[in-house]
Amino acid sequence: MTVLSRQIRIPRQRALPTVLRSPSGPGVAVLLGTDHHPFDRLVEWSAALAAESADPWFVQHGSTELRDGLDGRTMLGGRELTRLLDSVDVVVTHGGPGLIMEARAARHIPIVVPRDPAHGEHVDGHQVRFARRLDERGDIRMVTSLEQLREAVALARVMGRVAADVPTQRAETTVRFGELVDQLHRGGAPRR
């Protein structure tokens, strides 16, 4: 494992070929999803980093108030999201599986800031657990502080996106997620 700092870890087995980022493209997309809980922490971190950056930052902010100095929208349609993911260099998202998988499908290794119930950002810790598991597999970069986010964004800018011929685990993860949802709807406990 290569350690760039105490916060950012890159497993050796996930050394992937990358493509160069577009110097003219929008810099960073931050996606908060559709949950009704405010996610002020990530919006504040985004505003702080956008103020330090020459690259534009775009925030899909949902029910959270957008801060001065940030460009964004409350929600995005499917086509708008696809166009945004195709055009940006870096994707930061909450810990929802849908946005994580959409970012991966667009060949990003998303930076994930899971919503934390200790901050009133969600009802329970499922996003933290899910993100931790994906981070351990090398599918995402989970961050929990402003400094970790700063480093992860800088790293993503340098590394670029995953090359198109590198397989992702989207299908496997999506199928497994669907199985778990089906089991929960039937009232059964998920298999491990």
Image (cartoon, helix red, strand yellow):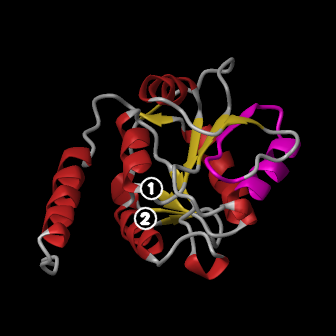
Labels 2 and 1 touching (C-beta < 8 A): yes
* Sequence order check, earlier mark of 2 and 1: 2
**Residue 58 lies in the magenta-colored region:** yes
- Crowding near pointer 2: few (<14 within 10 Å), some, many (20+)? many
Residue annotated with mark 2: 135
Give the residue type at disc 1.
Ile
Q: Residue at x 38, y 48 (%)?
A: 98
| 15 sits left or right of 158 in the view | left
Residue annotated with mark 1: 140
Q: CA distance from mark 2 to mark 1?
A: 5 Å
**Residue 105 versus residue 82: which sits nearer the camera?**
82
Give the residue type at disc 2.
Asp
Q: Residue at x 67, y 21 (%)?
A: 23
Q: Residue at x 53, y 56 (%)?
A: 94
In terms of secondary structure, where does tag 2 sit? helix
Q: Write the start and end of the magenta stretch as one range.
A: 43-64
| 138 sits left or right of 70 in the view | left
Whole-percent x and y of residue 25? 65, 21
The answer to which quarter of the image holds residue 78 is top left
